[in-house]
Image (tube, rainbow, N blue to C red):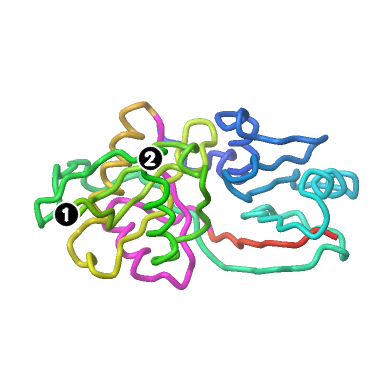
Amino acid sequence: MMNDDDPVLDDPVGQSLGGRHAPLARRLGRAATYLTGVTTFSCVPADAGRQDWDDLAALLGPDAFADMFSCPAVPPPTWEPVFRLEGRQMIRSGGDRTVPPRTASGTAVVELGADDVPEMLDLVARTEPGPFWPRTHELGTYLGVRMEGTLVAMAGERLRPPGWAEISAVCTAPEARGRGHAALLVTALAARIEARGERPFLHVAETNTGAIALYERLGFSTRKQVTFRGFRTP
């Protein structure tokens, strides 16, 4: 039976770092963050006190960026706000389960790995889908679409709370848009996730109405509104 109110989704970073992504974690007390080069996401408990924030600051170092994702805890006033972004968390519970083998242009999906990182970083720099670093691909499976050998679209798995896998880094080069690449990649990833008994979910900025409409067509629905926040340590 599907549980759309699964509480692990309320703390996807902490649940990932304490579970599937534990080998990629750095921890001190109740604070945790990812290894350098994987991602900048960090977490403290929702009831975090001064010691928890001090522990996270010790993990990150002075004047360092702390991407708190959707963590509701408020840091001490000495932590400088860097950004605040309204968004939503969406989960897949419906939609077409058929995975087309190719895009409308006949281009097939390929699996991406360490050798593809330079191209992945270049595509992210051109399209700005969200944070992506040299080791981000280690978080899960990444798929791409190539045109004449050049990577023009990709998407992959990021946060992995128990029973779930987040689809992220969905992006298409400007010259390759309008050909169904994003829909193909998201559908292919969702099928892989569901085949191993997990459920797909994702996060999207509230202003990205085009992406929200696409995800709704692919069977995703809004679970809750979230606020993404980042800070700089003292």
Q: Residue 110 appears at what percent x and percent y? A: 25, 41
Residue under the image location 42 percent in, 46 percent down: 117
Inspect the image, locate mark 2, and give the three-letter code of the amino acid beneath it: Asp
Residue under the image location 82 percent in, 50 percent down: 57
Q: Quadrant of residue 101?
A: top left
Residue under the image location 36 percent in, 49 percent down: 155
Above or below residue 156? Residue 193 is above
- Specify whether 3 is left or right of 97: right
Q: Are the two marked residues, 1 and 2, in contact with CB atoms closer than 8 angstroms?
A: no
**Dot 2 lies on which element?**
helix
- Specify whether 142 is left or right of 27: left
* Residue that carries the numbered disc 2 in the rendered image: 115
Looking at the rendered image, the quarter that the C terminus falls into is bottom right
Q: Residue 100 appears at what percent x and percent y? A: 15, 45
Residue under the image location 66 percent in, 56 percent down: 67
Q: Which sits in the foreground, 50 or 181?
A: 181
* Residue that carries the numbered disc 1 in the rendered image: 148
Q: Quadrant of residue 16?
A: top right
Looking at the rendered image, the quarter that the N terminus falls into is top left
Q: Which residues are magenta?
A: 198-224
- Specify whether 50 is left or right of 179: right
Residue 217 — which label?
none
**Dot 1 lies on which element?**
loop
Inspect the image, locate mark 1, and give the three-letter code of the amino acid beneath it: Glu
Above or below residue 58? Residue 234 is below
- Specify whether 226 is left or right of 165: right
Q: How many marks?
A: 2
Q: Residue 182 appears at what percent x and percent y? A: 28, 56
